Amino acid sequence: MDTIASLFSFITTPVSWVIVQFHSVYGKIFGPDTGWAWGLSIVSLVILIRICLIPLFVKQIKATRAMQTLQPEMKKIQERYKNDKQRQSEEMMKLYKESGTNPLSSCLPILAQSPFFFALYHVLNGIATGKTIGVIDDQLLASARQAHIFGAPLAAKFTDSADKVAALGATITDVRVVTAIMIVLMSGSQFYTQRQLMTKNVDTTVKTPFMQQQKMLMYVFPVMFAVFGINFPVGVLVYWLTTNVWTMGQQMYVIRNNPTPGSKAQAAYLERLQKHVTHHGKTRSRRDRVIVKAIVAKGRDRNEFERKFINGLTKAGLVAQPDGVVMKSDSATVVETEDGTTTTAPAAPKRQQPKRQSKSQRQSSVTAGGAKPVDESGPKTSLSKSDEPQDAKPAAAGGQPGTGTRSKAQSGQRKGPQRPKSPSKK
């Protein structure tokens, strides 16, 4: 460990300086020799480091989603070149280069924290052995050795002997109880963080070996934290527990507000967004418009949850525009183009059906308006009744059609004109 600590000695001084600055602030509130002053100094160091690592965390999210997108293509390459590992590796690197994805980007936050972790470990190890390090002088060293967190010294470990713990002014029981609880909390927070990532923020439509690897890491990482945790000082356990809690909260925020497409988290997010948009009749924030714009731009490539979201807006009388704005469709009709995008078109005017009047209403309107005189000189139509009765022409037996009367068909004969019978040859 001395060799590793010497490699990170260039960052030991800045880390010790930050801890001392926070200690000077908290020491005025809780007292300079208390565990609260030194413990909160370590917690504040973690928060400061994690705030600086937020850009790397964003890159980690993008890299993880890009890797999930490439999983089907990676699986095809593995099956195609399963007997040629070199060609398989070349095709993988080619795929990463074409997509602009770096597999190591998902590990950036952990790799960036490693120097601070080893520097803090070196500082706490110096406190345990009574050696000044960085900007921590003899006075601060004596203060740090007196600081206890729930009865356990900052520099004490679970594996320390009773004599070494007694030299720090504590008992072996207090040290082991406190460190055991912190190790359990540290492993539990790591497990829950990985579990919520696998159960809520993974595309369930794609089954790849990557998902199996993530499930395996969900159980491996907590065990590793538990094994290595018994060799960590209490101050380092405070550091690692704080960073795990920060990661868990940060990931919960990302899963809720920026979920992976096709995941259960996206289904819950789009359901909340649909209720919000339906209630207000529009998208109220820029982030909502960006989400709706991305869904509309996908067209026919939308997943099940995105199609359900668009259909829900349509049933509510709303339509999503290509710019992400949602508007009412009272005077517009939703038109879906060939590429799956939706636009609005003016609705056709409704036909006005005339109201049906009763016989008494029609007679009253005629009486009120007066009867219109009929021009006797003009031709009489079939709708006007003649005053003179028409002479009925008697229907001749076997009358011809077109004479104004229609004779009844005799039994055995069909109606209409009859075909003349050909003369019989005798």
Image (spheres, helix red, strand yellow):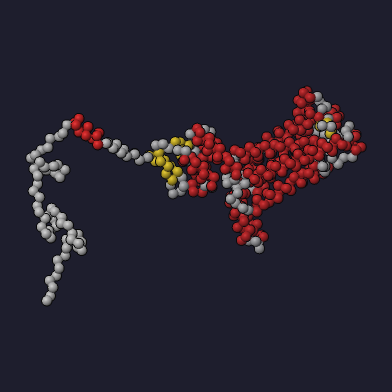
Q: Is residue 81 above or below residue 225?
A: below
The answer to whether residue 114 of the structure is visible from this angle is: no
Quarter of the figure with the N terminus:
top right
What x and y, as percent, mark residue 81?
63, 61
> Most extreme residue toward the top, as rendered?
28
Considering depth in this image, is 419 or 303 the residue closer to the camera? 419
Quarter of the figure with the C terminus:
bottom left
Residue at 78%, 33% in the rendered image: 16
What x and y, as percent, mark residue 345?
39, 41
The answer to whether residue 68 of the structure is visible from this angle is: yes
Residue 407 is left or right of residue 14, and the answer is left
Residue at 43%, 37% in the rendered image: 329
Residue at 84%, 40% in the rendered image: 158
Q: Is residue 368 above or below residue 214?
A: above
Considering depth in this image, is 49 or 188 the residue closer to the camera? 188
Residue at 30%, 39% in the rendered image: 353
Considering depth in this image, is 292 or 134 the residue closer to the camera? 292
Considering depth in this image, is 373 or 395 the residue closer to the camera? 395
Residue 5 is left or right of residue 54, and the answer is right
Q: Which picture quadrant has residue 193?
A: top right
What x and y, as percent, mark residue 348?
35, 40
Q: Which picture quadrant has residue 13?
A: top right
Residue 216 is left or right of residue 276, and the answer is right
